[in-house]
Amino acid sequence: MKAVSPSERSTEHVPDEQVRGVIALAHHCGAKGWIPATSGNFSVRIDAHDAAITASGSDKGKLAADGIIRASIAGAAHPRASAEAPLHYAMYRLSPKVGAVAHIHSLPSVLASIHFAREGKVRLEGLELLKAFQGVRTHETHLDVPIFANDQDMDALAGRVERQLKADSLGWGFLLAGHGLYAWGQDANETLRHLDAFDYLFTLVLKLKGIPA
Amino acid sequence: MKAVSPSERSTEHVPDEQVRGVIALAHHCGAKGWIPATSGNFSVRIDAHDAAITASGSDKGKLAADGIIRASIAGAAHPRASAEAPLHYAMYRLSPKVGAVAHIHSLPSVLASIHFAREGKVRLEGLELLKAFQGVRTHETHLDVPIFANDQDMDALAGRVERQLKADSLGWGFLLAGHGLYAWGQDANETLRHLDAFDYLFTLVLKLKGIPA
Amino acid sequence: MKAVSPSERSTEHVPDEQVRGVIALAHHCGAKGWIPATSGNFSVRIDAHDAAITASGSDKGKLAADGIIRASIAGAAHPRASAEAPLHYAMYRLSPKVGAVAHIHSLPSVLASIHFAREGKVRLEGLELLKAFQGVRTHETHLDVPIFANDQDMDALAGRVERQLKADSLGWGFLLAGHGLYAWGQDANETLRHLDAFDYLFTLVLKLKGIPA
Amino acid sequence: MKAVSPSERSTEHVPDEQVRGVIALAHHCGAKGWIPATSGNFSVRIDAHDAAITASGSDKGKLAADGIIRASIAGAAHPRASAEAPLHYAMYRLSPKVGAVAHIHSLPSVLASIHFAREGKVRLEGLELLKAFQGVRTHETHLDVPIFANDQDMDALAGRVERQLKADSLGWGFLLAGHGLYAWGQDANETLRHLDAFDYLFTLVLKLKGIPA
């Protein structure tokens, strides 16, 4: 409720709502053990042009406001941005419905990304918790989570993701083989719910095949 | 101990005891990770006609009193009731001994519901922790937990459950295939103990068959 | 430091040291999830005749001083004693070196008790953590944990345990098939260390055989 | 900020930075369950001659400053030093880049040390989290973690480790078969990150082979 001075409204200013959203995502994933060894990154859309996103490095499970930067989703370089920021920007460009993006390295997501790499996707099917995804009203359906090959050239990888996901329907997440999960939602809360659902469903699908997950 | 005004004694008033019971069940299951992605619902009987039950949506692991409504177990529609409320009401109608009902999506219960779907039940047998269930005095017995097919038509599903469980002895829980567990007890505390026992016994039965649970 | 009145020095009085020891064991095992559904019981020796032991029922993870009674290890009936108290008393009678006893239902101990039931024992061998047991100085040894058949007649079971363990060397624990673990040490702290070591070594032995534990 | 008197600057004095580092390592590993039954030990380099290291015994998950001693990495005997201290000293002698050393008994590290004992090493390969190790910039690489046979003669074992690791490149950790992991980094923080990465990668490598870890 305090007045915001013009200087704070600079391109660097991150509104409180987005700060809270990024921190909620980061702390939740830290507590779950999904971002080991200072990995993972999180963002929340500010408007049609910018997003709040975690800066490179540090333990995101202990993230505070000063570890969050404001960046252009057009992809202009930012000195403190994470190497994986281009994948976040790509998602915001793909659809105005993407309001928050989380990237984690949870064991079930990495195990699923390798076990199902040949199929190019993980099929989640016939399970009640599919209804946790926005827009899903019944367990009598399936959700295909695409798997992309891992790549250290993040701009090239973001380009591939952007081209392929444009062609299909967008869904709520994709996997990078041997690397981890990208998930999103219309806001931070929905993204959190989708992360929980992916974790649960990947674990279930693996265990149903007798794979210890 | 403060006086309750007549207006608070409306059909909407939920007594303190039932509020505490529903919250205890919800917080316990949240802490255990049994209600991922805002799933799960919990109720405690108020009298022969009404029960206190969690309203639809929200993270039940953080449930507060304003997330609990008073509903008729006869099944009259309530604007804030969860879609799964009819299954709770059915249990209260089946027996006056049902004093509290919990519905969770824990991984071991869902894994068991799929692995044993063909048998139509999970047999729990010869294990000391069977004695955690009300009325069981020895491990030299068995408990059959029935498995019903999942269905998004909750009124139809509640009808099937009510008809089949009437015919057999009631037991302390049933599974919905690919969905989760319904468990109950004579009060909230006993229901909590039964939930712990089901979780432990489903995990044990699966692991004894070499299934990672 | 406050004066203890003569009436408090009755046969019912439990000294502070033993109260602290029993509570430390109970809270540790509760936090680990080893005593689900109000199961488990814990005791610490007071002298050559008596022990402090948890009363029957209630969640031991939240144990307070009023849940601890003073009982004779000669086995005289106590109105609040747990049904399994005779097994504690038997251990105290077997050796003056037994200073504390814990009984838990942890999943790895129950899985091991069933998987190795035919051999009549679990062999723990060649692992560094064997050195956690009092008197063990090298991993180049083995420890055999005997497995007894479960029995609801606790006096008969205690008699069998007392006769068989007298014949062999005492060790630091035994298993009841499909039921759980009894472990002890020279005091509460050592018993706690032994419980941690059993949990770790049973888990390891099972996983090394490809059994999900 | 308070002045340190000359007497405190004795050979026994452990500077605050090293105290904080050792405690951070010990508490982290305690919370993770990696040092069961009072096992594990931790050290941080003070200078070219000395290191701060945990004294023998006690639960390191609750470590306080008085459980930390100052010891010469030349290996002079210290009355309170752990039996495993010579392995820490060997690492500090091997390279000035070793700024902190942790020794843990985590289940995944012990499982990996036994499953891959015949190969003499665990190969970690093609996984994104390899980038958590200092100096690794891509997943398209591999890291070989050597496995040494366990030995209760710690001086002999330290000698073997020092000779073999000198010959090869140093890496960031080694395993003792049936015993546990030694890991290090340029400081306590980096060592912590490396511990998390080893835990995650050993778990992943085992689960990818269908081994419950």
Image: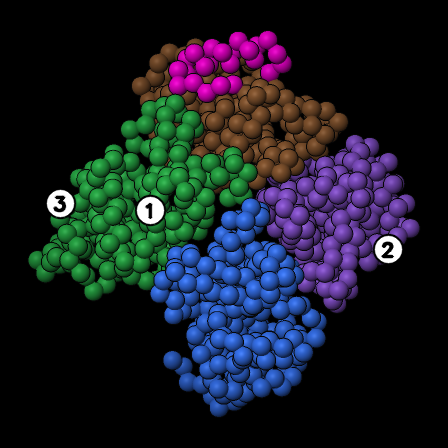
Chain colours: A purple, B blue, C green, D brown
**What is the secondary structure assignment of the residue under circle 3?**
loop
Q: Nearer the viewer, residue C29 or B59?
A: C29
Q: Which mark is residue C48?
A: 3
Residue A96: give x, y in percent of width and height.
Answer: 84, 57
| Label 3: how many Cα within 10 Å (few below 14, some 14–19, many 20+) | few
Residue B146: give x, y in percent of width and height.
Answer: 56, 68
Which residue is rendered at x = 48% and y = 57% of the image?
Answer: B201
> In which chain is the residue bearing label 3?
C
Distance between the alpha carbons at the discs numbered 3 and 2:
75 Å
Q: Magenta segment, which residues?
A: D148-170
Please say if D162 is above or below A109: above
The type of residue carrying mark 1 is: Phe
Q: Quadrant of residue B64?
A: bottom right
Mark 3 or 2, which is nearer the eye? 3
Q: Which residue is mark 2?
A: A169
Q: Main secondary structure of the magenta part?
A: helix
Q: How many numbered marks, from 0 up?
A: 3
Residue C155: give x, y in percent of width and height.
Answer: 23, 55
